[in-house]
Amino acid sequence: SSELTQDPAVSVALGQTVRITCQGDSLRSYYASWYQQKPGQAPVLVIYGKNNRPSGIPDRFSGSSSGNTASLTITGAQAEDEADYYCNSRDSSGNHHVFGTGTKVTVL
Amino acid sequence: QLQLQESGPGLVKPSETLSLTCTVSGGSISSSSYYWGWIRQPPGKGLEWIGSIYYSGSTYYNPSLKSRVTISVDTSKNQFSLKLSSVTAADTAVYYCARVGGIAVAEDWFDPWGQGTLVTVSS
């Protein structure tokens, strides 16, 4: 079973803010990275480390962490942000990677 | 610009071994800064990390798959490969390869990803 838990689905009105969370004990020790996946496409890295965005990722995407929870926030959601989002981090042993269960984001 | 491309059979029979190769272009697989990983996604389901390898050959695997997985690297061809033995229908998935960075500073990330290849396990 996955060690990183995400809400299955969230919705957000166009232009509003949505926060996606990822919970797991290993997040007390390791940062999460976040991936956006649109239908039929490979995942794309959107946030890593404390709050780093790869080149080309809009600044409306941001990351944060507190205790056992990592969060991805989309400020001013756009229609093109509708996708599945997955977190990833190391597991409790620190020796392996694990993906979260995924969150489907719908932009209304 | 670094690119990764998966290749291999799209259909594998039950109990046989699934074999895939990831070819890296636009950069060297022998970079000391990165690992190289395999991830899979069953149809309609989430992502599952399979394992990763360093250019030196050092590997680490998902404990749930470890008994059936072998990942190897060929630096002369700038490729790394996945073998998954004794496959069943549950191994049907899109298989992705990706570069893994940030490990030295515990800020791990997977980027970029290959486009993925669908492998179906069926007789």
Image (cartoon, rainbow, N blue to C red):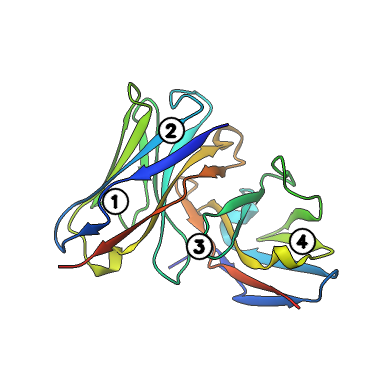
As shown in the figure, which amino acid type bears the numbered disc 2? Answer: Val
Question: Which residue is found at the position 52% from the left and 54% from the top?
Answer: A42
Q: Chain of mark 1?
A: B
Q: Which residue is mark 1?
A: B66
As shown in the figure, which amino acid type bears the numbered disc 1? Answer: Lys
Mark 1 vs mark 2: same chain?
A: yes
Q: Which residue is mark 4?
A: A73
Q: Secondary structure at mark 3?
A: loop
Q: Chain of mark 2?
A: B
Mark 3 vs mark 2: same chain?
A: no
User: So how many labels did they put on this image?
Assistant: 4
| Quarter of the image where one finds residue A8 | bottom right
How far across and how far down the image is residue B27, in percent? 50, 26
As shown in the figure, which amino acid type bears the numbered disc 4? Answer: Thr
Q: Which residue is mark 3?
A: A40
Q: Split into 4 quadrants, where in the image is the N terminus of chain A?
A: bottom left
| Quarter of the image where one finds residue B60 | top left
Question: Which residue is found at the position 69% from the left and 42% from the top?
Answer: A54
**Image position of B114 with respect to B87: above or below:** above
**Image position of B20 with respect to A77: above or below:** above
Q: Is residue A49 left or right of residue B103?
A: right
- Between circles 3 and 1, the one closer to the viewer is 3
Q: Chain of mark 4?
A: A
| C-alpha separation, residue under disc 3 versus residue under disc 2 | 22 Å
Quick one: label 1, few (<14), some, or many (20+) residues within 10 Å?
Answer: few
| C-alpha separation, residue under disc 1 versus residue under disc 2 | 24 Å
Q: Which residue is mark 2?
A: B24
Q: Is residue A51 left or right of residue B73?
A: right
- Between circles 4 and 2, the one closer to the viewer is 2
| C-alpha separation, residue under disc 1 versus residue under disc 4 | 35 Å
First in sequence: mark 1 vs mark 2: 2
